[in-house]
Image (spheres, rainbow, N blue to C red):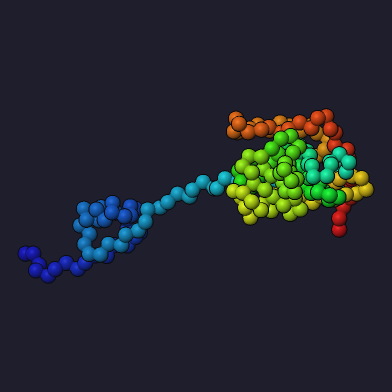
């Protein structure tokens, strides 16, 4: 004779079932389990580790690099220098800079406009706005930059700045420092992603002079 006493609810535990979620509740129902059912998340496999961070320029070497003679660059003119820079993955990569003269001062910058990362010179070794020769000008979209600070004072990237490199005169030598470059190897051509982009400009046979081994404390 069947009992009229209702059966007590059965509470299943997470460990009672090997399947969680809705599938687990359906299995529990087929097994005749009654009452509250505790759902659990299905085990998730660990994802692949994130890709390694892209290489960065290597820390400064402490060297002072002689790039040219001060007389090689006339007042209100500039000159492009394709170099090879060391990166922290041990590889050397092309690195194009330019040095601009303003009066008796010399300023070095990466040859890359912050607007679209294109070369700055509008003609070979012409970096100044051609009418008044007071500001640097990008030949692509006309952005103008203060020659002393590299700050864009007019144009599509106003307020941004060129990447400046520490540059100074040592006697007649125009020097840069605070980077890690190799002046002994040949400069490799840049493979342009944009077919309309320029490759690294040639230097008309100009040979960089030397590296000064000077270390700053």
| Quadrant in which the N terminus appears | bottom left
Task: Find residue 111 and report its image quarter.
Answer: top right
Asked if one can make out residue 113 in the rendered structure from this viewpoint, the answer is yes
Query: Residue 152: where, in percent of width, then height?
Result: 66, 52
Query: Residue 150: where, in percent of width, then height?
Result: 71, 51
Q: Decide if residue 107 is on the left or right side of residue 1.
A: right
The residue at the point 45 percent across, 49 percent down is 45
Q: Decide if residue 36 is on the left or right side of residue 73.
A: left
Q: Decide if residue 32 is on the left or right side of residue 75.
A: left
The residue at the point 40 percent across, 52 percent down is 43
| Quadrant in which the C terminus appears | bottom right
Placement of 38 over or under 157, stated as above or below: below
Q: Nearer the viewer, residue 54 or 205?
A: 205
The residue at the point 74 percent across, 46 percent down is 132
Task: Find residue 3 and report its image quarter.
Answer: bottom left
Placement of 111 over or under 26, stated as above or below: above
Total marks shown come to: 0
Query: Residue 50: where, in percent of width, then height?
Result: 55, 48
Query: Residue 201: where, in percent of width, then height?
Result: 73, 32
Placement of 123 over or under 151, stated as above or below: above
Q: Nearer the viewer, residue 70 or 16?
A: 70
Residue reaching furthest left?
1
Q: Nearer the viewer, residue 66 or 184?
A: 66
Asked if one can make out residue 176 in the rendered structure from this viewpoint, the answer is no
Residue reaching furthest front?
131
């Amino acid at each position: 004779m069947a009992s009229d006493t209702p059966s007590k609810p059965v509470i299943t535990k997470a460990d009672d079932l090997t399947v969680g979620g809705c599938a687990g509740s359906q299995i529990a129902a087929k097994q005749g389990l009654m009452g509250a059912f505790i759902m659990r998340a299905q085990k998730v496999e660990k994802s692949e580790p994130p890709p390694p961070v892209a290489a960065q320029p290597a820390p400064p070497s402490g060297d002072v690099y002689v790039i040219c003679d001060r007389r090689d660059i006339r007042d209100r003119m500039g000159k492009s220098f394709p170099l090879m820079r060391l990166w922290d993955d041990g590889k050397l990569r092309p690195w194009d800079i330019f040095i601009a003269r303003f009066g008796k001062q010399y300023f070095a910058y990466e040859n890359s406009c912050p607007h679209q990362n294109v070369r700055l010179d509008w003609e070979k070794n012409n970096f100044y706005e051609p009418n008044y020769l007071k500001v640097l000008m990008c030949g692509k979209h006309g952005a103008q930059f203060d020659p002393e600070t590299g700050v864009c004072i007019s144009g599509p990237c106003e307020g941004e700045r060129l990447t400046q490199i520490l540059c100074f005169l040592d006697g007649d030598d125009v020097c840069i420092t605070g980077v890690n470059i190799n002046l002994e190897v040949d400069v490799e051509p840049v493979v342009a992603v944009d077919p309309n982009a320029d490759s690294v400009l040639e230097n008309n046979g100009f040979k960089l002079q030397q590296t000064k081994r000077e270390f700053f404390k």
